[in-house]
Amino acid sequence: MIQSARIGLLMLCTGLSPLALAHNPICECEEHGTGEIVCTGGFSDGSGAPGVTLDVISYEEEVLVPGKLGDDSRLSFKRPDGEFYVLFDAGPGHVVEIDHTEIASQ
Amino acid sequence: MSKAAIAPAPSALGRFWYKWRFHINVLLVLIPLGFMPKYFQDVALFRGASGLGEREFGEVQVGPWSLRLAEFRNQPPQLEGPAGYMKSFNAALCQACISQVKVVYLRIGKPRSLRAAGGLFFGSPYRMGTSIPIPPRTKPDAELWITAEGWDGTVHQASIPLAEASPATLAWLKQQGDKP
């Protein structure tokens, strides 16, 4: 009985292992009526991203809002003037860029 | 007068099983055999025995270095949950530059900075892999940009048209563009 349970567990872990490998960074930003942009970061395996860097950068590569996501994996900031993009930076190769044109208002 | 109980007649399903059980079991052994060519093809792909990927699209010169690039699967981007559509590519550094190149990034469109250089190739320099997001709004004339950083701190970039790098992705993008 215990042997069967062990084999079952092994097969389950083997079957689910590809799911554990995939954890791409995800980030979504939306503007609320008052010109306040709220960005939410995380990973595709469902985990949050508290403390991960999220910078708002102008097209001239000037960091306008240097920030880190809060405990709820969110960061809010006032919409900067001019052209900018949001960079969710969870480490080299684990970044998400969101252009200001892609941030829809609610 | 005999009191022996009469056995109930077997059901139709019972009769079917009794008659065909041997053949059904043989079929259960034969069905997996039909999937074996696909299985061995996949094993060869994952181990690298069948090449860098399903479709190699040539050698790209990135500054003083060069690398061979391939689509891991010759197919359109695949939806990977909330991360959106992802596409996997493989790369192999040239023999002479293995010791010189620290990191290679890949992304659709020219990177704005080294921080946003895209997906990071990981694995052995003879066969590295990465998976990059392909936004459905990507223009068909987009380019795949390769950014390589050396151990000496130098950064070099090169690009290759997406049409050349992945015709399957281009066809998929055209389909996305046709959708209302």
Image (spheres, helix red, strand yellow):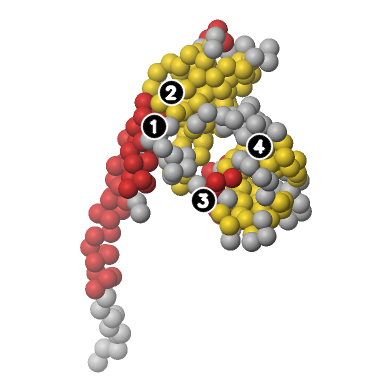
In front here: A33 or B71? Answer: A33
Q: Residue B160, labelled with which disc?
A: 2
Tag 3's secondary structure? helix
CA gap, disc 1 to disc 4? Answer: 25 Å
Chain identity of mark 1: B
Q: Respond whether the residues carrying marks 1 and 4 are from the same subunit.
A: no
Residue at 28% x, 51% y is B27
CA gap, disc 3 to disc 1? Answer: 26 Å
Compared with B32, B2 (above or below) is below
Q: Mark 3 points at which residue?
A: B81
Chain identity of mark 3: B
Q: Mark 1 points at which residue?
A: B141
Q: Respond whether the residues carrying marks 4 and 2 are from the same subunit.
A: no
Amino acid identity at mark 4 = Ser
Amino acid identity at mark 2 = Ile
Marks 2 & 3, CB-CB < 8 Å contact:
no
Judged by depth in the image, the label closer to the viewer, 1 or 2, is 1
Q: In this view, does A72 lie to the left or right of B61?
A: right
